[in-house]
Amino acid sequence: MPPGPCPISVRFDNMIAGVLEGGGIDPARFGAPGAAEPGAAAKEGDLARRFHEASRVVRSWRGRGVLGFLDLPDNRALAARTLETAAALRGRCDNVVVVGIGGSALGAAAMRDALLPPGWNELGAGARGGHPRLYILDNPDPDTTAGLLGRIDLSRTLFNVVSKSGSTAETLAQFLVIRQRLAALERRGEARDGRSRMRDHVVVTTGRDHGFLRRLADEHDLRSLPVPANVGGRFSVLSPVGLFPSALAGIDTAAVLEGAAGMVERCANPELLKNPAGILATLLHLADTELGAAVQVFMPYADRLKGLAYWLQQLWAESLGKAVRLDGTRAESGPTPLPAFGAVDQHSLLQLLMEGPRDKVVVFIARGSTDVDVPIPRMNDEDPRVSHLGGRTLFELLNCERAGTAEALRRAGRPNMTVAVDRVDARSVGALFMLFQIAAVYAGALYGVDPTDQPGVELGKALTGGLMGRPGCERPTLPAPDPRWRV
């Protein structure tokens, strides 16, 4: 897929000594132009050398085939199969419900929120262009599950059940509830021809060769889409996991992949100062390991990108929070990602960011334009507390809020940088997904850990299985509550 011009830039001057008040990174560490003495050849800085080594490691990982997400933009066969499945079901449902958790849901939610109009599920069918509503069932909270299933018409609903392993407990539990409700629907004669129609109501997205969902799809001849074996859950947004429900809702998934392809090409550049993912990874790794900024705040100034911040939280935490390095030494590495939202969290977190512990770095996500803006009317010109707002727009206010916050942090010596997109559209969202995925992998190489595994979540899963009575799992004996430690 040919990449177009990249709609994204990373501005990091508020991390640099001489710009950031009272601190910052010495520009000479980049080997940047101007770092050497006049007339002398510029020397490669230590950050550039670190990035070159990290790039070598990442290339070796890709050569071993473990970074399958990088190949998704050019996997024409998989993209075509995803679109064909969506086309076969178009017009057959009023609702699509994604049933999944973690990487099986966060990417689809982020894409929905970014690229569908606000309040999509409340719009009428005409305003949705005939496309279905798109819901996400992730957490197995009974209030949420019962509430959704009780208010939608199940006879006009498609359930996309997503689990790469095919055995995710939360997803399977919710699916069993759904399956029972579909069976009851058929017993009441509400199915369209009185016979089993699970094929019309369920599409499975799972691994190719194993797991309960794969077996179920084969036994019931369900439509199914594969998650490539070398694509981990948190890296799967550009696979059928994220693209199938998006295509059903009418999102231009080809443009999403085009934006991602352009970012793959750009982030292969071996020069640190020309590689946006390399800059993000290098500076955030340095902020954690040298500046003491182990809390990394991802703060979009666009409500449509809230889902991206939550998706980023999982990507950053699971990829980099590791007990052991690749060489077997103890690591216990990893920054703490924190989603925040501008301008709302200027009224909750900013006081802490400005004057609290110097253990935070902020990554703003900004947009250069908006498809819809709202003018602020001129009223009460006699009152200077409000007169300056009249004649401006809400988008101008939000942008000034971001710029003012970044400047305030700079003056306080609090490091920050900005990822800027021209506009929130399909190409830029695809590029954003790919940018942060590649940055996570580069950061893994810098920390010396495997960014593609997540061994730390397995014990909790096994103990949960034991408590629920799963065969083969330890049933833990939980410590008896000690009344001394309860109030």
Image (tube, rainbow, N blue to C red):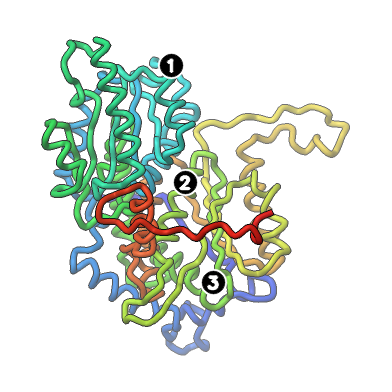
Task: Relative to 346, say whether 248 is above or below.
Answer: above
Query: Where 8 sits versus 55, above or below?
Result: above
Determine whether, in the image, residue 427 is placed left or right of residue 481: left
Q: Quadrant of residue 214?
A: top left
Q: Amino acid at mark 1?
A: Gly
Mark yes or no: residue 195 visible. yes
**Disc 3 packing (10 Å; few <14; some 14–19; many ≥20):** many
| Any part of residue 255 in sight | no
Q: Is residue 458 left or right of residue 339?
A: left
Asked whether the residues under the numbered discs 3 and 2 touch, taking CB atoms below 8 Å apart as contact, a structural biologist would say: no
Q: CA distance from mark 2 to mark 1?
A: 30 Å
Query: Percent x, y for residue 2?
Result: 24, 49
- In this figure, which residue is indicated by the disc labeled 1? 124
State yes or no: discs 1 and 3 in contact (Cβ < 8 Å): no
**Cα distance in 3D space between marks 1 and 3:** 47 Å
The residue that appears at 22% across and 63% down in the rendered structure is: 66
Q: Amino acid at mark 3?
A: Ala
User: Which one is earlier in the sequence, the residue at label 1 or at label 3?
Assistant: 1
Q: Going from the N terminus, do you reach mark 3 or mark 2 first? A: 3
| Distance from the alpha carbon under mark 3 to that under mark 2 | 27 Å
Q: Position of residue 167 (x, y in %)?
A: 26, 47
Residue matched to label 2: 422
Q: Nearer the viewer, residue 135 or 87?
A: 135
Structural crowding at the residue carrying mark 2, measured as other residues with C-alpha within 10 Å and reported as few (<14), some (14–19) or many (≥20): some
Check disc 3 and report the residue beneath it: 287
